[in-house]
Amino acid sequence: MAFLRLKHIRKSDLLGIMKDAISDVQNKLPYTVIRHSHGLQVDHIGLGVPDTKAGVGWLKEQIGADVYIGDPEPGQWYWSGSVSIGGSSFLEVIGPNPEYKGFQPFKTYLKDLDGPAVLFWYVAVDSFADVRRFMKKEKIPLQQIQDINLDAANPKQPGYSRGFVGPGFLSQRPNVIEWTHRPKRFSGESGCTLKEFRLVHPKAVQLSNVFAHLGIEVPISSGPSSLGVTIDTPNGDFVLDNPGMAWTGLRIFGLIGGLWLKHLSGVR
């Protein structure tokens, strides 16, 4: 039986078989998942912070390299800085936009962080429209779809189409993006290179199957939920690991309830 024979395959051979299978899937997909100069299909990684300016300053001290920070994207709840970690791949430092007055659950989540935390990651593709059609056909949820600054009317700000692999938001599942206008600040020489990107989740096998189905060759290990990075920097290795987050309707409802209780306490 094939199942019994698998028991005698060496781990290195099994990994080779898995890579060949993913390669076969990638050759049949209507889109390409872009691999960057550090060797991974990781376009950028989100480092959440409670305060963007303070977070950018902290990261500069940690890595010994400049971290760009400009104006917030118009109308967005977040404000971010960035540093290249290999070619056009970058680490995004993302915090709440103090000028945004509307309620946004994730903005509130960032404000309540105790310190910097790896919260999300993106893969880049050459055709977001083909990704949408493929995922709809395969019945894989693609959520929170946005088209931003596609005509580059504001050349200082990025242009892109994006969404995240559902259902619901989970740190270990990727966001997907097609860049239509990518400012130069996201690339260039910083002296920093992504060495390792770590994903850990109790349902690693199921998530790995989803990755393979989408042509995403990013390893994930089984264990308590966490994300982590190791980046080679002028100050040596920058290493950060933290628990992942799951963002469901129930979680949002609980957050809103907590904020309402805080408001009532303030009124009294």
Image (spheres, helix red, strand yellow):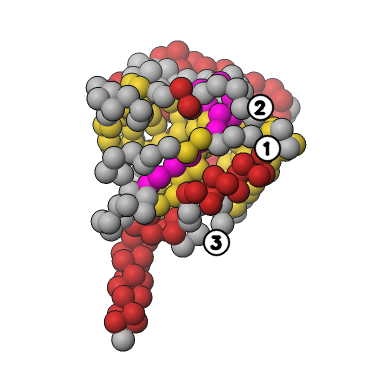
Q: Which residues are magenta?
A: 78-89
Hey, what amino acid is under mark 1? Gly
Secondary structure found at label 1: loop
Rendered view: 249 above or below 83: below
Indicate left or right for 190 with 10 as reference.
Answer: left
Q: Position of residue 90 (x, y in %)?
A: 53, 31
Indicate left or right for 54 with 177 as reference.
Answer: right
Residue 59 visible in the current orientation: yes
**Identity of the residue drawn at 52% across and 27% down:** 89
The answer to the question of whether label 3 and label 1 lie on touching residues, with beta carbons closer than 8 A, is: no
Q: Position of residue 205 (x, y in %)?
A: 54, 40
85 inside magenta stretch: yes
For the N terminus, the image quarter is: top right
For the C terminus, the image quarter is: bottom left
Which mark is drawn over residue 64? 1
| Residue on which disc 3 sits | 114
The answer to the question of whether label 3 and label 2 lie on touching residues, with beta carbons closer than 8 A, is: no
Indicate left or right for 244 with 97 as reference.
Answer: right
